[in-house]
Image (cartoon, rainbow, N blue to C red):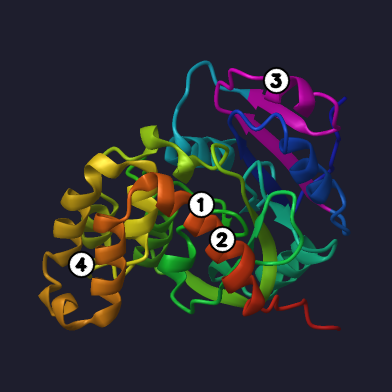
Amino acid sequence: MEAVVSKPIITIGIPAFNQEKVIGESIESALEQRGRGIDILVVDDASTDGTVEVIKKYPVRLVQNEYNMGIGQNLKRLMRLARGHNIIYLCGDDLFTGPDVVSDYIKQFQGNPKLGIIGRYYYQFMNGHEGAVMVSCDENILTQACNPSGMAFKVDDFKATNKIFIECPSIVAQYLRKGYEWTMFRYDTVAARLHPGGNTATKESYYVGSMYENWRDLTGEPLKFYHGYIQIKNRAPKKLWEEICQSLKGNMTALLNPIFWLYATIAITAPGCVLRPLSNFWRHRITRRFCRIIERPSK
């Protein structure tokens, strides 16, 4: 049964692909949002598991792609099919942090007709465990868009890309070129779930092309994401040396940065069978001790 919303103000756009075990929780966090004028749309990107069967249990709009379009193209299709004047993305394995998040976005859009982009802080959590293991409080609207969840836009046309790491930042860049204004919620509106094998970035098949090259082509600036070497070693080890070289292009001063050498040395020397459990230990036992979730301010 499909939820009918008259004159929706905003669409919650949920891209889904092979997320049978977690998509239900994501949809429930969307259904829990308070306020009028909320349209919920799920576009399944040709899942091969039971994702669609789970989605059909909920009162949301469901569209099924005939073939796998990829992240960037699926974000575009969600916007094209949105009934609201605005859209907020929520990946099919992530959660809104509270029931008033979307109403906050609505108020921002209604208060400024020139507003085209809303960013936010967010945190990551390990599936099955409470608390944050990483927080993202970057003030750069482009880098915040590397995770689409919680990013919101006025509905407009854009050229989609499936180039890794910049699927959503490329949307932001196009909106900025059109002259849209942007703002940032400085509280964690989204909890991004980490579940090995479930996140797109944990699959070797995702690493086609170079995220460092793509970022440089989009922004003209080097991507100083040195801990990304660990991610690449764990997920696509054959690309590690190529990515290290790409990250140094136009950024040779990185050779003077001890953080570069720390992550590069660990990624190159540590075998995957050691590095993967070490990464999990680091999240579970170390970083979570220093992560502070930023709650929604009381009104």
Q: Is residue 241 magenta?
A: no
Kind of element beneath mark 3: loop
**Mark 1: few, some, or many residues within 10 Å (few <14, many ≥20)?**
few
The answer for how far apart the CA atoms under marks 1 and 3 are is 29 Å
Residue 192 spot, x, y in % from top left: 63, 56
Mark number displayed over residue 220 = 4
Position of the C terminus, as image quadrant, is: bottom right
What x and y, as percent, mark residue 249?
11, 64
Q: Nearer the viewer, mark 3 or mark 2?
A: 2
- Do the numbered discs 1 and 2 sit on residues whose CB atoms are within 8 Å? yes
Sequence-wise, the earlier of marks 3 and 2 is: 3
- Give me the C-alpha separation between circle 3 and circle 2: 31 Å
Q: Where the N terminus falls, by quadrant?
A: top right
Q: Is residue 227 above or below residue 203?
A: below
Residue 121 can be seen, yes or no: no
The first of marks 2 and 4 along the sequence is 4
CA separation in Å, label 3 and label 4: 41 Å
Q: Which residues are magenta?
A: 37-63
What's the residue at 70%, 66% (across, down)? 189
- Callout 3 touching callout 2 (CB < 8 Å): no
Q: Helix or strand or loop: what does disc 2 sit on?
A: helix
**Proximity of marks 1 and 3: CB atoms separated by less than 8 Å:** no
Question: Residue tagged by mark 1?
Answer: 277
> Callout 3: few (<14), some (14-19), or many (20+) C-alpha neighbours within 10 Å?
few
Residue at numbered disc 2: 281
Secondary-structure class at tag 4: loop
Where residue 76 sits in the image (x, y, percent)? Answer: 49, 40
Identity, as a three-letter code, of the amino acid under mark 1:
Pro
- Is tag 1's residue or tag 3's residue first in the polypeptide sequence? 3
* 213 to 159, vertically: above or below: below
Q: Amino acid at mark 3?
A: Gly
**Around disc 4, counting alpha carbons within 10 Å, would you say few (fewer than 14), some (14 to 19), or many (20 or more)?**
few
